[in-house]
Image: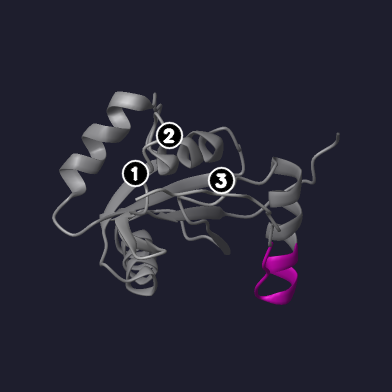
C-alpha cells in the first residue's frame, strides 16, 4: 500500500501519566497485568517506526520521569533524539498540556500537526495515521475513532 507523502513537521504526544477507573477498579492506566510490556511502550515503538513523526513526547506521572525513562529503556530500543519524556498530571488534559509545553519549550521541531494518542488505546496502521495527519493539517484538527467490542469478566 502506498503511503501518503507528509512534507511537514509532525510530532506525537502519548499521555501515560494518569490513572484509569474501570468498574471501580483503580490502576495505573498503563499497567494492565495481562500486558508484558507497558501499553505506552508498545505505542511508542509503533510511533518510532513512522518516519514522518519527528518527535514523540511520553508524558509520565508526576515525579516519575526517571522511572518512565528506565521502564522504556528496559523494553524499547531507541536511536537518535526522537524521544522526549515530560512530567504530567493526574488529569489527562493537564498531561496533554504539559506534553505540548515540553514540545514547545525543549524541541527544535515546530510541528504543524501534533498527534495525541493515549498510551492504552489500540494503535492505528501508518496509512490511517497519515490520512488523519493530512486531514488535521487541512481542517485544523482531525479525529480517528476505532470501535472495539470486547467481553471482560472480572471476578473479585
Q: Residue at x 37, y 47 (%)?
A: 30
Up/down of 138 relative to 68, above or below: below
Earlier in the chain: of badge 3 and badge 1, it is 1
Can you tell which of label 3 and label 1 is closer to the viewer? 1
**Which stretch is magenta?**
135-144
Residue 152 seen in the current view: yes
Q: Is residue 145 magenta?
A: no
Residue 102 x/y as whole percent: 31, 61
89 left or right of 120 in image: left
Q: Which residue is mark 1?
A: 31
Please tell me in which quadrant of the rendered image residue 127 appears. Answer: top right
Mark 3 crowdedness (10 Å alpha carbons): few <14, some 14-19, many ≥20: many
Q: Residues within 10 Å of mark 2 (few under 14, many from 20)?
A: few
Marks 1,2: beta carbons within 8 A: yes
Depth check, front residue: 122 or 56: 122
Residue farthest to the right, as pictured: 1
Q: Which residue does the image show at 49% across and 33% down from the upper left?
A: 45
Q: Is residue 5 left or right of residue 76?
A: right
Q: Residue furthest left?
A: 63
Residue nearer the viewer, 126 or 102: 126
Q: Secondary structure at mark 2?
A: loop
Colour scheme: one colour
Q: Residue at x 46, y 40 (%)?
A: 44
Nearest the camera: 141 or 41? 41
- Could you say which disc has been placed on residue 46 in the image? none
- The answer, for residue 82, to whether it is visible in the render is no
User: Is 123 drawn above or below residue 142 in the view shown?
Assistant: above
Residue named by callout 2: 35
Would residue 142 be found to the left or right of residue 105 on screen? right
How far across and how far down the image is residue 3, in percent? 80, 40
Amino acid at each position: 500500500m502506498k503511503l501518503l507523502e507528509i512534507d511537514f513537521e509532525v510530532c506525537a504526544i502519548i499521555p501515560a501519566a494518569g490513572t484509569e477507573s474501570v468498574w471501580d477498579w483503580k490502576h495505573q492506566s498503563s499497567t494492565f497485568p495481562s500486558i508484558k510490556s507497558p501499553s505506552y511502550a508498545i505505542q511508542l515503538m509503533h510511533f518510532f517506526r513512522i518516519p514522518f513523526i519527528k518527535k514523540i513526547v511520553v508524558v509520565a506521572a508526576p515525579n516519575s520521569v526517571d522511572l518512565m525513562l528506565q521502564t522504556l529503556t528496559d523494553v524499547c530500543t531507541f536511536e537518535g533524539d526522537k524521544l522526549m519524556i515530560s512530567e504530567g498530571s493526574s488529569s489527562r488534559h493537564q498531561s496533554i498540556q504539559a506534553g505540548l509545553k515540553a514540545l514547545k519549550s525543549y524541541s527544535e521541531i515546530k510541528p504543524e500537526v501534533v498527534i495525541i494518542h493515549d498510551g492504552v488505546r489500540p494503535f492505528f496502521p501508518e496509512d490511517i495515521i497519515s490520512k488523519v495527519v493530512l486531514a488535521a493539517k487541512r481542517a485544523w484538527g482531525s479525529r480517528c475513532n476505532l470501535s472495539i467490542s470486547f467481553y471482560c469478566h472480572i471476578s473479585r
